Amino acid sequence: MIELEISLSLPASLDVPWVQAWLSNHAQLSYQRSTQLTNIYFDTPSQNLKHSKAALRLRFDDDKNQWLQTLKTAGSMQDGLASRHEWETPVAQQAFEISALPAEAQAYLSPYVADLAAVFETNFQRDIYLYELEGNVYEFAFDHGEVITPQSQRTVIHELEIELITGDVIAMKQLAQQTHTALTATIQLMSKAARGYALLDSESA
């Protein structure tokens, strides 16, 4: 599937309770759930996935008590709107089940499967809200936590993702701009995976 989303980096001055209250008081937003997400990213020793601008992870969704495997491949970004292929399937435990992925994802990973190893984690709480208006449905995900490397380098995650569920992309971009202005946010141009790799690069520099 194609994932379409806009990510906004929130200023540190907006603490977690304040952002949660802002979301809860928004007329078109309805609270869905909160969960703790543990995300373990994998790559080869030569970082083949990174060089292909792909990301592979195992995620544990605490609220659902469920492990998920996810592959995201290289995408594009225009005016802050990220578009990329994403495949996600549940797995029984903390281990990949490559055969459960669609054939296209299996083919993409097949050269690397034997050499995969954990490289970093992104662990955060996600508060999920749905925006519904005039047939448009978007997911607001407020993420707050950390990116962590094996050497314990860390960077903060404090951001709001707006993802298209169904409806008009242009209307979503306009909504994101309004949210951007209201929260004095900035467009987050780096994915969580890219920030993890940036930390790894700083360790080896």
Image (tube, rainbow, N blue to C red):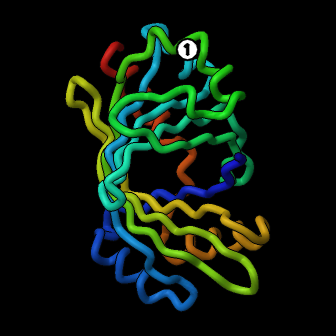
Report the side of 40 relative to 86 (left or right). left
Residues 58 and 48: in front is 58
Which SS class for mark 1? helix
Q: Residue at x 57, y 45 (%)?
A: 189
Q: Amino acid at mark 1?
A: Asn
Question: Residue 119 sits in which quadrant?
Answer: top left
Residues 64 and 200: in front is 64
Q: Residue at x 32, y 61 (%)?
A: 63
Residue 198: in sight, yes or no? no
- Mark 1 closeness class: few <14, some 14–19, many ≥20 residues within 10 Å: some
Q: Relative to residue 134, is residue 144 depicted above or below?
A: above
Q: Relative to residue 28, is residue 67 depicted above or below?
A: above
- Give percent across and percent down for residue 150: 25, 24
Q: Which residue is mark 1?
A: 48
Q: Relative to residue 19, is residue 95 depicted above or below?
A: above
Residues 154 and 138: in front is 138
